Image (cartoon, helix red, strand yellow):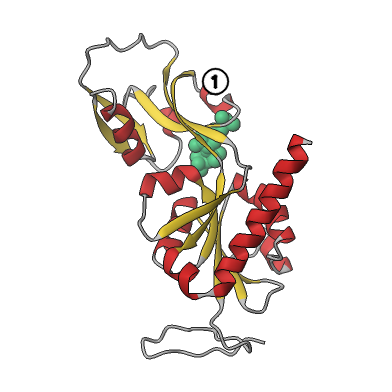
Amino acid sequence: MTINQSDATGFNSGETTSGRGQLTFAVPKGRILDEALPVMGRAGVVPEDGFHDKANRSLSFDTTREDMRLIRVRAFDVATFVAHGAAQVGIVGSDVVEEFDYADLYAPVDLDFGHCRLSVARLASDPEESSNVSHLRVATKYPSLTARHFERQGIQAECVKLNGAMELAPSLGLARQIVDLVSTGATLKQNGLVETQRIIDISARLIVNRAALKTDPRVAAIVATFRADAELRAQGKAA
Ligand code: PRP
């Protein structure tokens, strides 16, 4: 049973019968979720049936644990909710963790799914940039990782921030290059692009708010459970 209590700020702490506030577990919309759900299930994080109903417009869901709710938000927002302590735990790609580099966000477990890479791509018909270029324009959802990547090559990257469909940018003249996630490579291919540099390999991570990890033993217990499951899966793969 959940006892809803509002504190002085009007924040609904949702205190449970166990006496502690409700934990919030943030998960991203999109592909990673399908792989995350079985792993979450083994760790005892099982959403109510409504979570799977595509017509359901709720963003917050009960779980089989009375002291935990699930929120489903965009991947970048998973990191923001957890970094600010509005959610204590979450699952997100390491691309998001590295893009933000939030001090209050800790990513203790590599979940070994959601594998893809962050890469630079250009139109297949576009000739290679000359090697002494010092400035270029890149369309991306990842301005920080992109700038850092090109800085290492002594190039100043002017990032044009897009939230999706980066692959359109070169053919429409927005930027000659893009930096985006590549999994199968089908999206690049179907839009006439080729991968030219691989920036980082990516996998899904369990993330926690550092303060919550220190103060709430349930958060440490969740980390231990996910870590044990990841280790078991790694052993299974190795065997
Ligand atoms: C991602 C990414 C690419 C695509 C790559 O987009 O931004 O567009 O997947 O996958 P592929 O190499 O297997 O073709 P996603 O479909 O997750 O949607 P998004 O544009 O909303 O991020």
Image point (41%, 44%), residue name: 98
For the N terminus, the quadrant is bottom right
Total labels drawn: 1
Position of 221 with respect to 180 (left or right) is right
Please state the horizontal and vertical placement of residue 52, each as a whole percent of the image. Answer: 70, 60
Image point (41%, 43%), residue name: 163
For the C terminus, the quadrant is top right
Please tell me in which quadrant of the rendered image residue 66 appears.
Answer: bottom right
Image point (52%, 75%), residue name: 216
31 relative to 137, above or below: below
85 relative to 201, above or below: below
* Amino acid on which the number 1 mark rests in the picture: Lys
In the rendered image, which residue does mark 1 sit on?
Answer: 189
Confirm or reject: label 1 Cβ below 8 Å from ligand 1: yes
130 relative to 7, above or below: above
Please state the horizontal and vertical placement of residue 14, each as a whole percent of the image. Answer: 54, 84
From the viewer's side, name the closer residue of 160 and 87: 87
Please state the horizontal and vertical placement of residue 196, each as a whole percent of the image. Answer: 43, 18
Image point (60%, 41%), residue name: 114
